[in-house]
Amino acid sequence: MGNHIKVLAKLSLLSALLVFASCGGGGGGSSYGPKSSPYIYASDYVAALNSVDGTYSTSLQLDTYQTLRSAQPGQEQWFVIWDAKYSEYKAVSLNYVRTIVYYDYYSNNQAVASEFRSIERGDILSGQINGDYYGNDYEVVDRRISGYYEGRNSGYLYEDEAGSLDVSLMAKEKEKMNFYEKASKVSFVYNVSLETSMSMVTLGTKIEKMLSHGNGELTQKDQTALMGDLKTLTGVSLEEIQAASTDPKLKADVLAKVAEKIGTTSQNLEQKFLPEVFGITL
């Protein structure tokens, strides 16, 4: 029963762990070399720019799902920001930001923002003051009187009055995008399949609701439900995991079974996933 309590206590912190993971904590190696930020999102990028520039005035104007250019076949995911450093609106390809290579000990958002500023400075010094020549990666945009943004280099429109959506529909779309963004980051941090990370995010939300309804504590009914969730997520029961801790052959079998279920390696499962997420050490 004591081990059950230990796991449940750890489960009650799962939502906090997922918040940490979704903010970019963990993940990546510690050796110095070329790195990139393949899971950064528009909001992360803006926050990193503010940190690098020493200002909090740069802001996200249109997210990727709100821009007209993103919706066009063959186009990348584009977002629009107000760039406080240069006092101008700017459209940026999220796909481009995710491929920027920088040198550091680990992947981090500040490094990609800093490298972007270096690239941008080089473009400006070479005479490309409105972004890359064709507007394929990023470009300065003008906000017209009628309320849309137009690219100076590409001529693309990023928003117009007719492109506005129903507010409730946009809210639902943003909620869905936030869910997938968080799941993608959790998948990266814990090195598990996207399907598993989506289940983890859902479980974290479920635990938050349980704790709010139980005045910060898990009820007996909650504990029973979470034991079932643990088995659904990993493919084995807590009892099987506990038995594996004293049986080397069973341990190998259980690790292989769970690793296959959640889409990771046995090493990652034993050294990171089980200890950090469920407080289980084999």
Image (tube, rainbow, N blue to C red):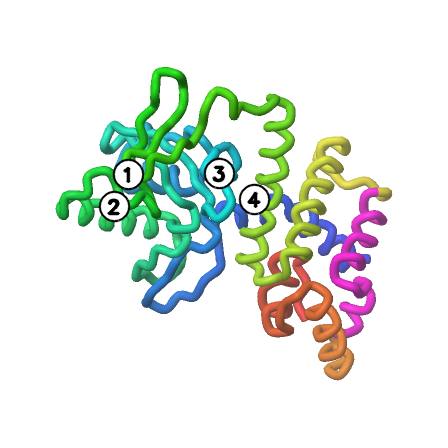
Q: Amino acid at mark 1?
A: Asn
Q: Main secondary structure of the magenta part?
A: helix
Q: Nearer the viewer, residue 91 or 100?
A: 91
Point out the frontmost of discs 1 and 3. Answer: 1
Residue 162 visible, this angle: yes
Local SS, label 2:
loop
Q: Nearer the viewer, residue 97 or 151?
A: 151
First in sequence: mark 4 vs mark 3:
4
The stretch of residues the image draws in magenta is: 222-244
Gap between marks 3 and 2, in whole Å? 22 Å
Q: Position of residue 114 (x, y in %)?
A: 28, 48
Q: Quadrant of the N terminus?
A: bottom right
**What residue is shown with label 2?**
133
First in sequence: mark 3 vs mark 2:
3
Q: Position of residue 68 (x, y in %)?
A: 48, 34
Point out the frontmost of discs 4 and 2. Answer: 2
Q: Are marks 1 and 3 in contact (CB under 8 Å)?
A: no
Q: Quadrant of the C terminus?
A: bottom right
Q: Amino acid at mark 3?
A: Thr
Local SS, label 3:
helix
Q: Nearer the viewer, residue 59 or 144?
A: 144
Task: Say the numbered circle drawn on residue 153.
Answer: 1
Q: Are marks 2 and 1 in contact (CB under 8 Å)?
A: yes
Gap between marks 1 and 3, in whole Å? 19 Å
Q: Are marks 4 and 2 in contact (CB under 8 Å)?
A: no
Task: Indicate left or right for 235 with 43 as reference.
Answer: right
Gap between marks 4 and 3, in whole Å? 22 Å
Task: Indicate left or right for 171 with 133 as reference.
Answer: right
The 10 Å Cα crowd at callout 2, few under 14, some 14 to 19, many 20 or more, is some
Task: Say the numbered circle drawn on residue 19.
Answer: 4
**What residue is shown with label 3?**
64
